[in-house]
Image (spheres, helix red, strand yellow):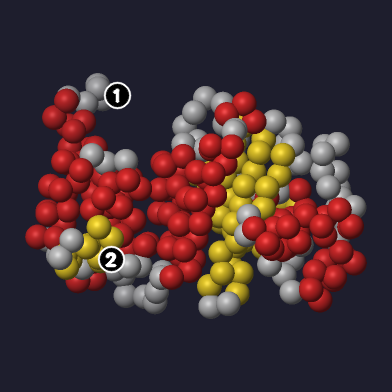
Amino acid sequence: MAGGPLSPAASSSVKSATRTLDIIEYVVAAGRPLVAQEIATALGIPVSSLSYLLATLVERKYLQRDARRYSAGPGLARLQSPRGGYSLAERVAPLVRTLRIQLDETTSFFIRHDWEIEALVTESSEQALRYSVPSGQRLPMHALAAGKALLAALPDDELDRYFAESTRQAFTDATITEEKALRKQLGQIRKTGFASTEDEFSRGIVGTARVVTIDGMPVGSLSVAVPKVRYDTTLDGRICDLLDKTAALLEEA
């Protein structure tokens, strides 16, 4: 028998449980102590509600508090299976989710496979008009912001090999396929740290991406895809700022 709608009390309990899990995931993924305001801003939780949840998590030792900062507590060990450290996907997933919550735009983390990329983790916008990243599908590096960010991070000799070996298909009339033009764009990405595309893979979509480097190696790229009708310079600045902060959480962990 199908269940009816949740009562207000039950709905509130579910919301609190979801927020509690979001807090734990975010603090663990951050890899550094965070003040309450950082957590509240990142997850969109009112400070009044957050204070109670943080106090409960500290009491149960899932978080520990040092002055005004919160970090992962010893109680989390009770939840761990006896295996090694977190996989890249496990580390990235809560941060991609948080970035999607902050922007409500489709957010993904891509990894490279030879001269193609694949979404390791993706979270779709909840808005009616949105772009969804195909999961498990190999995509061309030259036509997506995430791929361009990873191309720009390649050493020169490997980039030369890319141009010698790759076939760069034009998906729209805006797709950059010519080597000279693409090299010029990659040079600009190296200067700014951000890659962008407009209509290159899918018409009506603007992509922005930033490479993530761990132990000196580019391990993937964070990317945000936005319908052009919602895209403006204000949103672009906010996306770049949050991509920078999110990438830093991974790189500093």
Q: Is residue 9 above or below residue 188?
A: above
Front label number (2 vs 1): 2
Residue 176 position in % (x across, y down): 83, 47
Left or right, 151 with respect to 53, comes to: right
Q: Quadrant of residue 25?
A: bottom left
Gap between marks 2 and 1, in whole Å?
Answer: 44 Å
> What residue do we see at 45% from left, 57% from top?
245
Name the residue that disc number 1 marks.
2
Q: Mark 1: few, some, or many residues within 10 Å (few <14, many ≥20)?
A: few
Q: Amino acid at mark 1?
A: Ala
Residue 50 position in % (x across, y down): 19, 46
Q: Assign the N terminus to one quadrant of the image.
A: top left
Q: Amino acid at mark 2?
A: Pro
The one of 221 and 140 positioned closer to us in this rendering: 221
Q: Quadrant of residue 83?
A: bottom left
> What residue do we see at 49% from left, 50% from top?
241
Does residue 87 show up? Answer: no
Does residue 41 show up? Answer: yes
Q: Residue 33 — which label? A: 2
Residue 162 position in % (x across, y down): 82, 66
> What residue do we see at 21% from left, 26% from top?
6
Q: Quadrant of residue 14?
A: top left
Residue sticking out furthest to the left = 59
Q: Pick whichever of labels 2 and 1 is earlier in the sequence.
A: 1
Q: Residue 233 — which label? A: none
Residue 164 position in % (x across, y down): 90, 67
Left or right, 28 with respect to 136, comes to: left
